Image: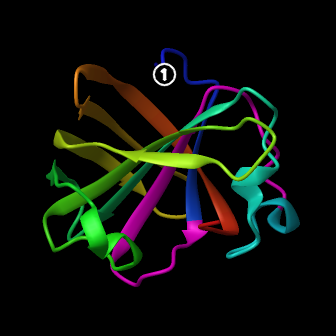
Amino acid sequence: MFNTIAQATWVGSPDSPGTAVIYLLSQPYSCKVPDWAPGGGWDGRVPSGAQIIELKTAGNMPATFSVTSVGAAGAQPPPAGMAYVHWSLHNGATPVEVPAVGTTVTIDTVNPKQNITGTFSLSFGGHMVSGSYNAAYCPGAGEP
C-alpha cells in the first residue's frame, strides 16, 4: 500500500464549497490547470503505477477531521468536521477507489493560495497508512 509521497496538491476548485481537497501522489504529476481540470478525469492520466490518496475535509481549518466511511454519500461532501478519504492505483484504466474506513486527517496550517500542511492516520481495513504532507496550492485544479 501507499508508502511514498512524491507530490501533495491542494486543489483550488473543489466540487463542494466549504471543503478542502488534497491529493497525495506516489509519482509527480504536472500542476498545469488543463491537466487538473475539474471533472476532466485527470486521475486516469497520472503515470501508470501511481497511487493516489484523496483527502476531502469539510469545515473550518485548521482542525482535525474524523474519517468516515464514504458509502453511498461519496458524491456529496462529508459532514462538517469529517473527512472522506480514498486510495487508488492507476493501472492504465479508470482507477478503482478504495475508501478509508476510519481515523483522522489533520490540517495544521493554511496559507491561502500557497499551501496546506498536516498529518493523516488512515485505516483501509487491515492496512494502516500515516504520514505528513505539505500540499502546494494548484489554482483552477479540481476533482476528477
138 in relation to 7, above or below: below
| Residue at x-position 28% and y-position 74% | 73
Q: In this view, does 121 lie to the left or right of 38?
A: left
Residue 2 % position (x, y): 48, 21
In this picture, which residue range is highlighted in magenta?
12-32
| Residue at x-position 59% and y-position 67% | 143
Where residue 77 sits, quadrant-wise, is bottom left
Question: Residue 17 lies in magenta, yes or no?
Answer: yes
Residue 97 % position (x, y): 49, 48
Q: Which residue lies furthest to the bottom in this view?
A: 17
64 in relation to 39, above or below: above
The residue that disc 1 covers is: 2
Q: Which quadrant would the C terminus be assigned to in this image?
A: bottom right
| Residue at x-position 30% and y-position 57% | 84
Residue 11 % position (x, y): 58, 62
Q: In this view, does 72 lie to the left or right of 23?
A: left
Mark 1 lies on a secondary structure that is loop
Q: Which colour scheme is used?
A: rainbow
Say which amino acid is labelled 1.
Phe
